[in-house]
């Protein structure tokens, strides 16, 4: 029995030291309830009184040796597993990262930002007004009395009888004049609303950029100088401007402003529809009644104002010929600009 025990010890330790993964099976094989060592111990009942403590001591020594071997090899295997996982799961921080897909600024926003920037460089500041405006600020104060055609229910989104979605950014002129003392030099970019069915050149919502200058001695010459300079900065230094007489309720005299086509330089092409010129804005000297409505004395101060369609400028800049394309927000289309 003694030699059996010695043999078990030799086999078990050899198996343990050769193990590459789990030691559990080996432990059960020798020390489990049906294990080899346990079977020997069960047979001890047939031993004599003299033999029993001797064999018992050897059996204990074998058990201790096996347990010690299990512990040492277990620790070694743990270390090996850790080292292996450090190698296998190593992070390569020099590996090329996957770039996130970034969009870009919408053509309308880009045009609006560029226009705003040019006027800020010329000393203008930005004034804002609400999109839900009073009928008074949107029409009456801007010299468009009750019988003016633009006030028709067919053309304007009314909220109540006295409030509406502003049809133009011009009411900001009134708000600015009431809130400031001249000299006033502001622009006001923003959304405006008209009851139009969407087609290639109309949309029920679009953007305008309004400008207003009020001071002593402001003339049509100042208006022409500022707008000509704007056109050159916006569309290129060769750009020419053309002022055509027009009629707006808010200004007197009034002028529509055309710029020479920056694609053909005035010869005529597809973008300018063969004209050589493109209309970009309406302008004029602020009507004395409008100055009065803003709380400014027209005998002391004069001023000029202008308003331009931002979509119009964005379309000209991007060579787009259908307004609806700007609002469909089809990424495949917008990616081109
Ligand atoms: Zn052209």
Image (cartoon, rainbow, N blue to C red):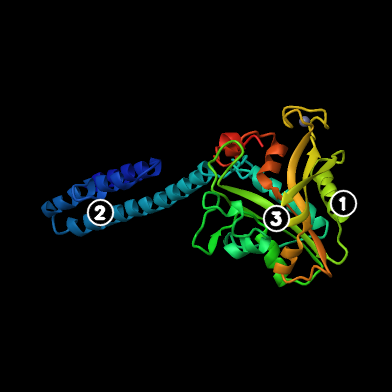
Q: Disc 3, disc 2: CB below 8 Å?
A: no
Residue at 38 percent across and 42 percent down: it is 21
Q: Nearer the viewer, mark 1 or mark 2?
A: 1
Q: Residue at x 75, y 66 (%)?
A: 291
Q: Identify the residue under disc 3.
A: 249
Closest to the observer: 203 or 154? 154
| Circles 1 and 2 in contact, beta carbons < 8 Å | no
Which element type, helix, strand or loop, lies under badge 2? helix
Determine if residue 105 is in view. no
Q: Which residue is mark 2?
A: 59
Residue 197's spot in the image, x, y percent? 53, 41
- Confirm or reject: label 2 Cβ below 8 Å from ligand 1: no
Q: Secondary structure at mark 3?
A: loop
Query: Cα distance, mark 1 to mark 2?
Result: 111 Å
Foreground: disc 3 or disc 2: 3
- Please state which of the two labelled residues, at mark 1 or mark 3, is closer to the viewer: 3
Mark 1, residues whose alpha carbon is within 10 Å: few (<14), some, or many (≥20)?
few
Direction front: furthest residue: 147
- Name the residue beneath numbered marker 1: 225
Mark 3 / mark 2, whichever is N-terminal: 2
What is the CA distance from the residue labelled 3 to the residue labelled 2? 114 Å
Please indicate whether residue 4 sits to the left or right of residue 115 in the image: left
- Quarter containing ligand 1? top right
Q: Residue furthest left?
A: 46
């Amino acid at each position: 029995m003694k030699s059996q025990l010695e043999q078990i010890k030799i086999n078990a330790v050899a198996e343990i030291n050769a193990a590459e993964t789990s030691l559990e099976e080996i432990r059960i094989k020798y020390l489990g309830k049906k294990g080899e060592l346990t079977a020997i111990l069960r047979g001890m009942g047939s031993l004599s009184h003299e033999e029993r403590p001797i064999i018992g001591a050897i059996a204990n020594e074998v058990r201790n040796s096996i347990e010690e071997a299990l512990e040492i090899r277990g620790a070694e295997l743990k270390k090996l597993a850790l080292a292996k996982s450090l190698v296998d799961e190593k992070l390569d921080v020099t590996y090329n990262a996957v770039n996130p897909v970034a969009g870009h600024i919408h053509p309308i926003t880009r045009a609006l930002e560029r226009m705003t920037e040019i006027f800020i460089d010329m000393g203008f500041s930005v004034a804002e007004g609400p999109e839900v405006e009073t009928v008074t600020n949107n029409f009456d104060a801007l010299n468009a009395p009750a019988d003016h055609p633009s006030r028709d229910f067919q053309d304007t989104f009314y909220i109540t009888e006295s409030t509406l979605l502003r049809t133009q950014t011009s009411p900001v002129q009134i708000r600015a004049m009431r809130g400031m003392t001249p000299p006033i030099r502001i622009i006001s970019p923003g959304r405006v609303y008209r009851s139009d069915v969407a087609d290639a050149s109309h949309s029920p919502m679009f953007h305008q950029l309004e400008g207003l200058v009020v001071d002593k001695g402001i003339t049509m010459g100042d208006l022409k100088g500022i707008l000509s300079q704007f056109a050159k900065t916006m569309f290129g230094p060769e750009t020419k401007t053309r002022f055509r007489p027009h009629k707006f309720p808010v200004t007197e005299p009034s002028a529509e402003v055309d710029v020479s086509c920056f694609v053909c330089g005035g010869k005529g092409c597809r973008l300018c529809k063969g004209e050589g010129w493109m209309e970009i804005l309406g302008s004029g000297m602020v009507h004395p009644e409008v100055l009065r409505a803003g709380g400014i004395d027209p005998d002391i101060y004069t001023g000029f104002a202008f308003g331009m369609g931002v979509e119009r400028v964005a379309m000209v800049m991007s060579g787009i010929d259908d307004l609806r394309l700007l609002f469909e927000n089809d990424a495949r289309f917008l990616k081109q600009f």
